[in-house]
Image (cartoon, grey):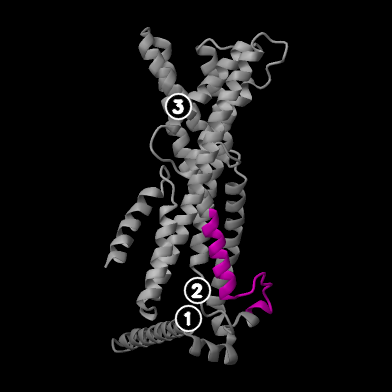
Amino acid sequence: MSSSPSKPSSSTTPNVFQTAWRRLKFFTVTLGTLGAGLTIANLPLPGMRDAIAQKAPVLLLPSVAAWDYHYREGMVDFQQAEQLIQQAKHPNDLDQGDRKLKSAQSHLNALPLQGFEQYGDTYYCSFRNCGWNFSSREIQQRREEAGRIEAVLTQERNLQLQLKQITDTIATTESEFKTTKDNAKKQTLLAKWEQNLSQLDMLKSNSLMGRIARTEHLRVSTNYQKITGLTQAQTQSGNLLQAAVPFAQAAQKLTAGKSHSVAEWEAIVRQWDNAIEQIQSIPVDNADYVKSRKVISDYQQQADRAKIRLTEERNAAESLQAIEAQINTLVQNHSSLNRDQAKAQLMTIEAKLKKIPQGTTAYEQAQDWLQSLQKRLAT
């Protein structure tokens, strides 16, 4: 009679599991150790990485490959963002450019500003075509370029917000003007409308929002002319004279007040020039020619006054800036000057402060400094 096959003893089964468990732990620890070692090798520690780059550059491949990836992706996003923002044709281009720029900055920020030199990039580039220099200087330049593009985007966003506020106000004004029957209220709305036209005119530029502002200005002007009874063609002299009025009124409103900045005086001059431009085309044989010359003469005088004030404001601002620099220099060198030398310089500054003309934005600051300086001289 044949004997039945023997069953494995109960003591054999635990040994098998224990052996498998020991092997699993060994492989896990080994892989963990290798992974930790590779991670440590790729840390941005110059001394250690320099040694590794010379002995075993293959260990630095993960970080160098990551740098290469972030640079390539960052530059693709940056170029797209630059094109979308600087050559924008629609506000949607700005939105897409914003997203691309943020992505580009994220990639560029993932690159360290230190630690490229002799960090294994030569070995990496021997089998991977590197299209950049692996240098901190280049990364810094790319980040600065991205910052400049971001500044352009910020400016466009600010103009976009201003443009929306103005166009919303114009739409409300136009709607109220069409529905109201109160003549006094109509005059108030017309004045508000003219002010909005002036604000639109100041936004015009070669940027995307500046071009949209130019289109909106033309549209709003056309609507304004139609609703107030002005002919769109403006071929008659009376219409030309009337078309100049909103610009002249806008200039007068902007002139109100004690002092204005350089930008404000430039806007005022522009308004007077626009008013003059409206009526210069009236021909000699027109019945309103003599009247138009008188109006032009008056507008030109106003424009010349504004130009004089513009020059005064610009010169005053520059003078005050130069005086401030001289005061700072005097304060720094005060300890090396004797009493007579310090007093002579203070008197020179005093004479310059007295030349700051009244009516400029720099005058009030100049007077404050002058009072302080005269007290110092009196001691």
Nearest to the observer: residue 375 or residue 243: 375
Taking the spot 59% from the left edge, 83% from the top edge, the residue there is: 120
Nearest to the observer: residue 247 or residue 333: 333
Question: How much space separates mark 3 and mark 1, taking CA atoms?
Answer: 59 Å
* Image location of residue 205, percent across then percent down: 58, 39
Q: Name the residue under label 3.
A: 195
Quarter of the rendering occupied by the C terminus: bottom left
Is any atom of residue 182 visible in this view? yes
Per the image, label 2 sits on a secondary structure element best described as: loop
The answer to whether 290 is drawn above or below residue 317 in the figure is above
Per the image, label 3 sits on a secondary structure element best described as: helix
Taking the spot 44% from the left edge, 52% from the top edge, the residue there is: 355
Taking the spot 55% from the left edge, 66% from the top edge, the residue there is: 70
Taking the spot 37% from the left edge, 7% from the top edge, the residue there is: 181
* Image location of residue 15, percent across then percent down: 33, 89
Quarter of the rendering occupied by the N terminus: bottom left
Residue 112 image label? 2
Nearest to the observer: residue 302 or residue 355: 355
Residue 142 forms part of the magenta stretch: yes
Q: Earlier in the sequence, mark 3 or mark 2?
A: 2
Q: Given this view, does label 3 or label 2 mark the residue nearer the observer?
A: 3
* Image location of residue 190, percent across then percent down: 44, 18
The answer to whether 280 is drawn above or below residue 39 in the figure is above
Residue 44 image label? 1
Q: Earlier in the sequence, mark 3 or mark 1?
A: 1
Write the start and end of the magenta stretch as one range.
124-149
Q: Given this view, does label 3 or label 1 mark the residue nearer the observer?
A: 3
Q: Do the residues labelled 1 and 2 touch (CB within 8 Å)?
A: yes
